[in-house]
Amino acid sequence: MHYLIRTLTGRGRDTALETEYSADQLTLGSGEKDTVQLPGLAGQLRFSPTGDGGASFSAKGIKATIGGDSTAKAKLAVGDQLQVPGYALEVIAAPTGFDFGLQIQSEGVSYADSMEVSERLWSMRRSSWLLALLVLVLCFLIPVGVLFSPDVAQTLRDAPLPDDGMWSSGPLVSAHSTAGIAEDCQSCHTTPFVMVKDQACLTCHRDIQEHVDIGIHGAEDFADVRCATCHREHNEPTTMVRMDNGLCVDCHAEPADFPKAEGMAEAHNFTADEHPEFRIDLLVPKGRGGSMSWVYEPRRLNEPGLAEQSGLKFNHDVHLNPAKVKNLQTDEALDCAACHQLEADDEHFAPITMDGECRSCHELVFDKFDPKRELPHGNTEAALVAMEAHYIRQFTDPDLRAKRSGGDNDARSSRRKPGSKPNEGVTCNGTPFECGRQETERQAGVQFSKTGCVTCHNVVDSMSDNLLDRYYVQPVRITGDWYTGNRFDHRAHMAFQGENQDEVCMSCHEVMTSGHAEDILIPGRDNCLECHDDNLGDTTVYCVSCHAFHLPAGTMATESRNVGLMHQNPRESTEGE
Amino acid sequence: MHESLLSWQRFRYLYIALALAGASIVLYITQSGNTAQPPNGGTWQGYTLGTVGALLILWLSLLGIRKRQYSSNVGSVQSWASAHVYLGIALLVVATLHCAAQFGWNVHTLAYVLMCLVIGTGIYGLYVYLHLPRAMARNHAGRDVNSWMKELGDVDDGIRDAAGNVDADLQAMVLSALDLTRLGGGVFAQIFAQDRCRVQTGSGVISNQGQQALIDELSRRIPDARVVREAETLNELMALFGRRQVILNLLRKDVQYRALLKIWLYFHVPLTMALLVALTIHIIVVFLYW
């Protein structure tokens, strides 16, 4: 196709420059490939001749004004005029040999480019809508899908799509940053627009217990307390576990507000004036004879006449005196660790047992003629039966019987050898059964009332004819935990100044002067105040450094938090079934 | 004397804004007594600061409506603008204390960032409103833009006339310099006053920044002029292009000033709308996952 372009130049509008072009399509613009250069034109104009001297016109990136209308597409005939910024165009009759003719007039200087920044920017309305919708869709409309179905939630969270994770107000504590919780907001935020319920916490923390037994102290005092009242998630720095004294003294500073909490003393701080004397958990025997048991009774350490009632006879002072008691292996004085082994919790000590700590010295031998034979421990009847079987066998075997009665001159003599025991080597002429029973009865008298059992135990002699029923050894229970609701780190305190471990132990536990098992050797408040008095300003302790909040004596949280169960007597409900 | 936006009513809103910021700081500090949690948006102080901040944002965005209500007599627009500036900056304090500077990749921080962008563009807007009008007036040198444009047209006419008297090569070059002159252009060209004028030479199109290429060509030719008339014509062209350079620079500077004066609002307003949406989502979501 051949085109004639007439460009009007110069000031005289009649001066023109005519140029011929050959191309499939006539394009005008400022781009390199455009057939005719129109410098500064923001877009491209295209003309395709229609054969009658006119052309079909289209514009890209720009609009032309044709007869007062702004358009990007038109059919043009000879004589039609177009206006584009900077140029006036007119379709002219193409001379013979040309398919299309166009006259171009540059309108003064071709400052076709925009001189108004607003012409080159999206309108404020348009960008406002776009930005606002973008935020709405990405930050709300898509993530909100998680609320409608778990499948949608899973899809959103798995795919690289915006999900409700972007609604998190801060990082979770590391323990909660775990599969099943971290990415699933609804594992805690179960109901929209409702604060996280305790049940959400208790789903995992099944064994956690309330602060107190709510059955005793009144659930109404704790009615508005949620787990999250103290345990605040999504915080920086994390404050999942409260350490401050406010946690405790908010209530404990005013015991009068909690009349049901008997014995609760006023506490503000750990000083002599603001903290009461410690309250130990004293094991107190209840009931008599076989129905006896121990119960914990909270007692203040400054109560007069307070005594441990373990049922054991024991003296620390003698056991720690090397002149009287020595370690069998080292032949040196006993140290604390000979009997008291710290457990893995660094707070408690392994229970003292006969076999573990006592028996190596306190053997239960009873027969001089069989010095290695020992009585079983912990069962009176078993001990008597064992003794009886032993003696019957001794008197059944003729050799042994002879040895007991005749083989030894001393034994036959009516006079005792100094130092020998009075009931040894007694001659018996009855049947082995009679002699065995007789010897058992006598030996039992010695073991249960003179030496042996009675050394450490309280024994009641009922004077019953039946030997198996005659002696009752009171049960023993040594206190393993004086402060059941509290914590103490023995290992940390062993770093305390002192030459050796025992000195550190004895700096708190006054064992060297304790001659009775009834002595309570657990230290009280003043001992701790020596270092931890808040007035001293250093080695400060918080309430929760020693006091656990979730007490072992507290109600199981899962039960008490369920209001439905709390007002219902569990016995009634089982009877109904 | 014109009373500045800042000193309006003897700095009344400056004092109000300072009082607001001061009260917010005091409120924030009282959070340190709360040992259950560190300062954040979830304490009662945090909720208070958040409510104040949200109400401020709402009120600040009402300026766009108020300034169009010419019949309204709820305070003068100048008064509103002065309060808008001071309280807008105070909002930065309120909102930062509300969130206790805890940030993350979440919608809450998005709202904060959008707010900061809005305030930042606003501060820029304030700066240009205070300084550019004077600079523009100085640039115009007592005339208006149309007058300068008209002079540029006259200069160009003069150049076209004079160009008829020089050889064809130079004529083509001179005329192309007129045709390839650029003023304004895209957003960046306007803001940075880019001079993208070009000129057609025998060896191709080259940059004619500051009309320098053409002026250089003319000055190269003047010593070689064979006849006096040619030299006169070249000198005339030289003078005209010198003038042209001055006018073009002035106009380019004017375009730049006007662009700088307007561009910030094209961010300030859309970002405000995005902020209002993000703020609404922030509030809903906080209580949705309470």
Image (tube, coloured by chain):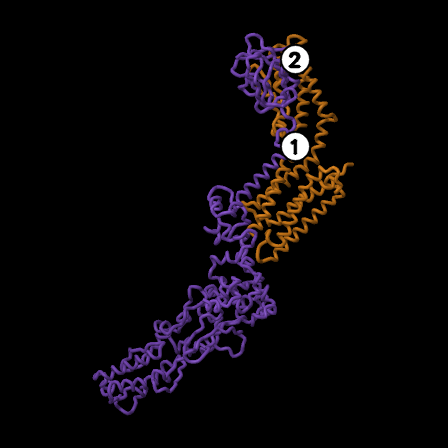
Note whether A43 is above or below A266 in the view shown: above
* SS at circle 1: helix
Q: Position of residue A564 (x, y in %)?
A: 52, 63
Q: Position of residue A528 (x, y in %)?
A: 53, 68
**In the image, is A375 to the left or to the right of B92?**
left
Q: Position of residue A411 (x, y in %)?
A: 26, 88
* SS at circle 2: loop
The colour assigned to chain A within the rendered structure: purple
Q: Nearer the viewer, residue B183 or B225?
A: B183
- The amino acid pointed to by label 1 is Leu
Residue A545 in sight:
no
Please report the residue visible at 74 percent of the width from the left and 40 percent of the height from the top. B72
| Residue receiving disc 1 | B260
Label placed on residue A10: 2
Q: Position of residue B7 (x, y in %)?
A: 74, 41
Q: Among the chains, which one is orange?
A: B
Q: Nearer the viewer, residue A17 or A313?
A: A17
